[in-house]
Amino acid sequence: MSQIKGKKIVLAVTGSIAAYKAAYLCSLLKKRGADIYPVMTPNATFFLGPATLSSLAGNKTIVRQYEQGEKIYHISLARSADAVVIAPASANTISKLARGICDNFLTTTALSADCPVLIAPAMNHRMYLEDSVRENIKILSGTGKYLFIGPQTGDLACGEKGLGKMSEPEAIADRLCFLLVRGKDLEGKKVLISAGGTREYIDPVRYISNLSSGKMGAALAEEAAFRGADRVVLVTASGEPNSGRVEKIKVQTSKEMKEKMLDFFDDADITIMAAAVSDIVPEQSFDYKLTKKDDILSKLKFKLNQNILNILASEKKPGQLLVGFAAEYGLDMENVQNKKKNNIDAVIANDISRKDSGMGSEYNEVTMLIGDGRAGKLEKAKKRIIARKIWDSLIENLIDKGKT
Ligand SMILES: Cc1cc2nc3c(=O)[nH]c(=O)nc-3n(C[C@H](O)[C@H](O)[C@H](O)COP(=O)(O)O)c2cc1C
């Protein structure tokens, strides 16, 4: 498995009876050529000696938060790692991560990591099925940074049988390899994304806009950075990316958005117009606040706005990839199909009539039209997870096929 050769992996172990399997996982990863940096919670040391992992890894196992020679070691370790794997992961540590509690070296390192964190839960099946633990796993899964493997159903150390057994070290190592490949599948690409609802000013204090939060565009930008894109620029009217690797350009109006998108478009390999650009704009924007004395109603006239996606499509060069979003009130696929013009490689449609997903919501459910018009539906999920699946699909159908 060459994908893992020379990769810096933090192997994090928590206080579970399955901790002994971490020793095997450590030598397995080492054999595949990875550089292993072991980290343990203080409780994990009741189950496995740090010296065992240090010897197998060839690097000192870190347990105590405040005993490192290097200043702020958890940050430097987390920042330089290609992946963190927490195996086994106790219910306690999973819950701490979900709530942002970092009271030991392991949780502090995992929370400050900017790379994928693979979690292999191991616990009694009643603990695993406990509502609070399920909720915490759901929170972590929705962030995009944390990925889970297992647990499996099997004989548990407590003598019971159920869902809680840690996945086998071979399976964890294989998943890690897969993640490290995916972690690089946008390497060499420059990505440009727009997000949010534009504001079209009538006067200095009034504007028309829409309910777009910009979360979908921000999630797409985060995922692009997560997958190793060389540069990710987000031109945003609202969404805030949760990644230091995304360059954020704030805009308000569709005019500003168009200008900024055109500034970066030439250099971009892949452009996604996820912003909800207003279809209409005031015919005139006043530089003073209109009052009743100004005969305000007679001055409120609107015109159709320019279509930024179509403008970009007309500027597109061979090798560039352009993707548009269609916000549809009730999903009319014929309408969506019409939006997919020649120079637009994919259209992602979402139904904004739904209260439980789409505009403003944390969730989305989308239908994708790619290339020659094949439609694929991505079932309702957190926007960060939808973003991952959109990139999976674009990479599989367009990028891997050499369109860019
Ligand atoms: C013998 C024994 C086995 C345990 N096994 C597990 C386990 O497999 N999974 C788990 O979540 N907790 C297990 N626990 C409880 C954890 O060790 C406990 O919640 C601890 O606070 C975890 O700390 P940590 O997450 O900081 O490592 C076990 C406790 C004991 C005494």
Image (tube, helix red, strand yellow):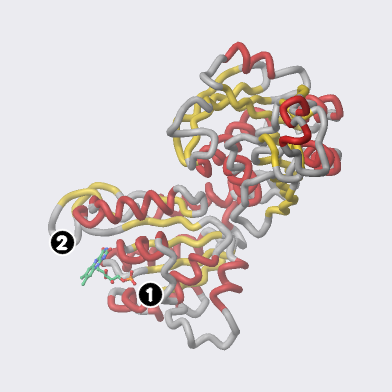
- Give ligand 1's quarter of the image: bottom left
Residue 100 % position (x, y): 44, 65
Residue 357 versus residue 25: which sits nearer the camera? 357
Is label 1 in a helix, a strand or a loop?
Answer: loop
| Residue furthest left in the image | 159
User: Which sits earlier in the primary sequence, circle 1 or circle 2?
Assistant: 1
> Mark 1 to mark 2: distance in Å?
21 Å
Q: Amino acid at mark 1?
A: Thr
Q: Can I make out residue 271 in this image?
A: no
Q: Which residue is mark 1?
A: 41
Residue 305 % position (x, y): 77, 26
Ligand 1 within 8 Å, label 1 CB: yes
Q: Is residue 394 above or below residue 41?
A: above
**Drawn side of residue 294 relative to residue 196, left or right:** right
Residue at point 51%, 76% (across, down): 58
Ligand 1 within 8 Å, label 2 CB: yes
Is label 2 in a helix, a strand or a loop?
Answer: loop
Residue 234 % position (x, y): 71, 46
Residue 183 versus residue 291: which sits nearer the camera? 291
Q: Can I make out residue 73 in this image?
A: yes
Residue 352 % position (x, y): 53, 27
Q: Are marks 1 and 2 in contact (CB under 8 Å)?
A: no
Residue at point 46%, 54% (across, down): 173
**Badge 2 density bin: few <14, some 14–19, many ≥20, Cα 10 Å:** few
Q: Which residue is mark 2?
A: 158
Q: Amino acid at mark 2?
A: Cys
